[in-house]
Image (spheres, helix red, strand yellow):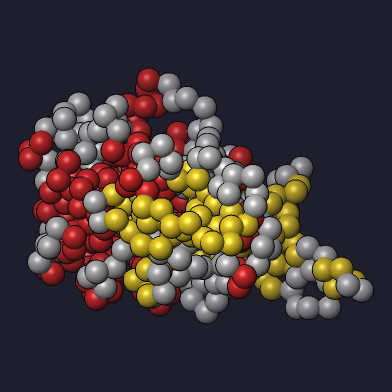
Amino acid sequence: MRQTTKLTDVTIFTGYSYIGSCTEFVWIPGDRIGTKQMPSRFIFRNLICEYDVEALMIRKDLYLRTAEGKEYVVSDFQITDINDAENVSGIAHNFDLLFEKFPEMKTITVGEKVVVSKKTQVTAFKTVSNIIHSVRSGQGIDAKQTQEVAAQLAEEVVRSPDAILNLMDIKSFDDYTFTHNINVATISLLIGSALDLPREELNELGTGALLHDVGKLKIPLSILNKDGKLTDQEFTEMKSHPTYGYEILSKSRGISERARMVALQHHEKFQGGGYPKRLKGTEISLFARICAIADVYDALTTDRPYRVAMSPYDAMKILNSGIDNHFDPKVLIAFVRKFSLYPAGSMVALNDGSFALVLKNNPSSVIRPVIKIIMDSSGRRLKDRVEINLLEYKDLFIKGPATPADLNITAGSI
Ligand SMILES: [Fe+2]
C-alpha cells in the first residue's frame, strides 16, 4: 500500500479566490488491485469554507498552502461526501508538490519553439499565489517579485520575436482563475512586443497584466462563482473590482502608475461605455487597451462554470465582430497578426466536411491559410493531394482544428 500524506493548517485557494482552510488534509493514494487502479482519496478535516462548499465543488483543481508556505496541487478532484462537515472527502487524480512536479502542465509553444518555459510558468504561478496570500492577510504586494516575474515573461516573449503563437496551446493549467492572470500577461506581452514596445515598457505591461484582476480578491465568492445571472446589486459590486485593484496596488509600494492603470482601466471600452469611468479612445492607457483584448480572449477560450470554451477561431471572430468591437482597432490588428489559429502542420476541418493539413499561413488572413485536402467530404482519402489557397475560395472555410482521430488515421500516415 502506498503512503498516506498528511498536511496540517492548510489554506485552500484557486486563483484570486481564497476558498477556506482546514486543520488537516489527508491524501490516501489508491491501491492497485490486480490490473485495476483504485482512485486516490482525500479528506479535509475541520474544513471552513469562506462561503459554502459549493464554491469548492465547481473547481477542477485545488491549490493548498501549508503554514510553512509549501504549495500543493490537487488536480481533477471531486468531492464525494459532504454529509460530515468535519470530514469532507472525495477522490482526485493527482496530488503533487507544486514546485517539484505538476504533470498536467503543458508548455506554451510556438510550433516547436517554446515561448514561455515551464520554469517561468511555475515561478509566475508561485508569484500569483504569494500575491493572493499577501492581499488576503492585509499586506501589500511584493512589487519586486512581481516585476521580476513580469521581466522574466517579457524576456522569453521577446526572445521569439517572429513567433506566431499557436493559440490552442496557450493554456498552461486547467483552472481559470489561477492561470488567467498568467495567460493574460503572456498574451499582453506578445501584443506589446508586436507593437514594438521597448523592453522597460514591456516589463511594466507584464506587471500590470499579472495584477489586472487583483481587485477580485475583495469580491465575495458568492458573486464571483455565481452560476446564474447576477442581480443589479451584485453586478455593481462586481464592477468595483478595477477600483479595488487600483486601491490595493496604490497601497503597495513599487508598483508604477502605468501598471496600476491596467487594473483600473481594463474594462473600459475603446468606443466608450465601459467601467468604472466610461473613458473613451486614448483616454484609456495603451497598456489597459492591450490587456482588455488579452483578458477577453482568454476568458472566451476557457471553460467556465456557465459555459464551455469557444474555439480560438470563434473567439477571434467575436473580438473582431462589429457588435462587440470595443477594442482599440490598432491593438486588435497587432493581436491578430501575432497569432496563428492554425499553424503550419496542423490539421483542420472544413465547412464542407473535408479535412486538410495547413501548409502555410497567409499574412493577410490568419484564418485563411494555404491547405492541402487530405480527406474529401465523402470520407475518401485523396491520393493526389489537392492544394488550396483559402484566400481564393471564399465559400470554403475552416470550421476548427482537427486531430488524426477525427479522420480515423494515425499521424505518421499523413
Ligand atoms: Fe477584470
Is residue 150 or residue 12 the one in the foreground?
150
Residue 124 position within the rendered picture, expressed as x and y whole percent measured from the top left: 36, 67
Q: Quadrant of ligand 1?
A: top left
**Dividing the image into 4 quarters, which one contains the N terminus?**
bottom right
Residue sitting at x 37%, y 22%: 233
User: Can residue 15 be spotted in the picture?
Assistant: no
| Residue 306 appears in view | yes
Residue that sits furthest to the left in the current view: 283
User: Is 247 on the left or on the right of 33, as rendered?
Assistant: left
Image spot of residue 232 (x, y percent): 37, 20
Q: Residue at x 36, y 62 (%)?
A: 360
Q: Is residue 370 above or below residue 200?
A: above
Q: Residue sitting at 17 percent across and 55 percent down?
A: 259
- Residue lying at 61% horizontally and 40% vertically, measured from the top left: 54
Taking 312 as reference, is 268 above or below it?
Answer: above
Frontmost residue, 256 versus 155: 155
Residue lying farthest to the right in this orientation: 34
Q: Which of 365 and 171 is in front in this view?
A: 365
Nearer the observer, 183 or 71:
183
